[in-house]
Image (spheres, rainbow, N blue to C red):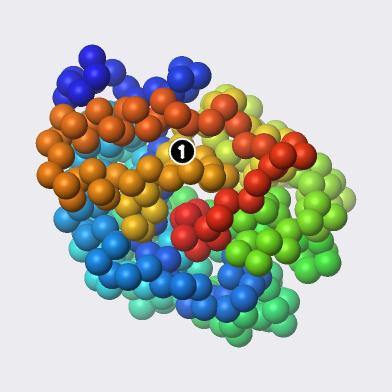
């Protein structure tokens, strides 16, 4: 029943249940990855436009009451939001109300000093972006020379028990495709889940080209040349990655996320909330829906539920990257949230 606090689990018009909420805490970032912020500092949203921690806690509670089971905090770099441990602690309380998983995606820079505090606040697990294991390539791709610190952050996360740790690498032809098997070796050595992501058209400079995409198939082949992979026999469901283990029984896991060449939209369970309070029903949406304006104009909880349910019904059937009429989102990844 629309608006009822006893509503059925959120579903879109294609009958896909929505279980996964990505919440961006900030559009700021201390890295300058060329596939996200190729032209330097983005325009920073005014502070008054950003959702407060109290607002994030309030709307997250509503989402959980509607069946959201996973919340992932993203950015920009989410740890640039002041006192992030406070919002983690607030959201961790939702575990008593149906939240199963509270995660964070980060570039890892702040982890050496703060991983333990994140765990203590109630964070379950962490994903760390590492686009190269070579200092010079890392600097060229991210704009900062801090690979050693990020690797220290991975160690700190492991030591703090933020497991399972996932490492994300965006693979871009001409930059780091020659490191794919090296990343697999890293996964084996450190017992982490290594996830390879195809290069997507989400850069603010709109420099993306299909020729720069290294396909999921090529990534698998490059790894198999050194380490034989075996598909993990689990139902994929709404997972974004195809998962593999090493045939020789070595620790670690490989995941391949191939939204360009192997779209997985049919079982998508995700919805996104930007740092300034806009609901995005797809990573590649060209329309946003202002949940911030709804809650700031005095909507009741029931009215807010109505709004969320109506927006979810507008969720796109799929992205349109591979179609001639595809339009790149107007906001870069730093604004949308990962």
Quarter holding residue 212: bottom right
Q: Is residue 3 left or right of residue 154?
A: left
Q: Position of residue 40 (x, y in %)?
A: 57, 78
Tell me how many marks there are. Answer: 1
Mark 1 Cα within 10 Å, few/some/many (few <14, many 20+)? Answer: many
Q: What residue sits right under mark 1 in the picture? A: 281
Q: Position of residue 30 (x, y in %)?
A: 48, 77
Residue nearest the viewer, comparing 152 with 17:
17
Residue at image position (67%, 53%) is 201
Residue at image position (21%, 40%) is 61
Residue 252 in view (yes/no): no
Residue at image position (14%, 35%) is 301
18 relative to 291, above or below = above
Q: Is residue 307 left or right of residue 109?
A: left
Q: Position of residue 74 (x, y in %)?
A: 42, 57
Quadrant position of the N terminus in the picture: top left
Residue nearest the viewer, comparing 169 with 263:
263
Q: Position of residue 180 (x, y in %)?
A: 76, 58
125 relative to 39, above or below = above
């Amino acid at each position: 029943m629309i608006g009822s606090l006893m509503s059925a689990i959120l579903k879109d018009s294609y009958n896909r249940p929505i279980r996964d909420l990505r919440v961006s805490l900030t559009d700021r970032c201390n890295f300058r990855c060329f596939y996200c912020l190729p032209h330097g500092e983005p325009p920073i949203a005014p502070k008054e436009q950003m959702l407060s921690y109290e607002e994030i806690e309030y709307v997250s509670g509503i989402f959980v009451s509607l069946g959201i089971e996973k919340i992932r905090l993203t950015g920009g770099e989410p740890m640039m939001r002041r006192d992030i441990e406070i919002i983690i602690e607030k959201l961790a309380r939702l575990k008593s109300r149906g939240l199963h998983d509270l995660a964070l995606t980060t570039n890892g820079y702040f982890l050496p000093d703060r991983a333990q505090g994140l765990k203590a606040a109630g964070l379950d697990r962490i994903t760390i972006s590492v686009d190269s294991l070579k200092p010079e390539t890392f600097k060229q791709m991210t704009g900062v020379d801090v690979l050693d610190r990020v690797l220290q952050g991975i160690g700190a996360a492991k030591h703090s028990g933020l497991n399972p740790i996932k490492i994300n690498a965006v693979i871009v032809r001409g930059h780091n495709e020659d490191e794919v098997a090296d990343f697999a070796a890293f996964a084996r050595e450190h017992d982490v889940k290594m996830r390879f992501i195809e290069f997507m058209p989400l850069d603010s400079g709109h420099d993306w080209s299909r020729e720069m995409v290294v396909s999921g198939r090529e990534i698998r082949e490059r790894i198999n040349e050194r380490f034989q992979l075996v598909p993990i026999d689990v139902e994929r469901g709404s997972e974004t990655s195809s998962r593999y283990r090493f045939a020789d029984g070595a620790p670690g896991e490989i995941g391949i996320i191939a939204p360009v060449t192997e779209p997985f939209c049919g079982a998508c369970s995700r919805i996104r909330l930007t740092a300034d309070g806009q609901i995005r029903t797809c990573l590649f949406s060209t329309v946003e829906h202002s949940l911030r304006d709804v809650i700031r104009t005095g909507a009741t909880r029931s009215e807010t539920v109505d709004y969320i349910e109506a927006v979810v019904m507008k969720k796109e059937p799929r992205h349109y990257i591979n179609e001639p009429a595809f339009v790149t989102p107007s906001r870069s990844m730093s604004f949308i949230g990962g």
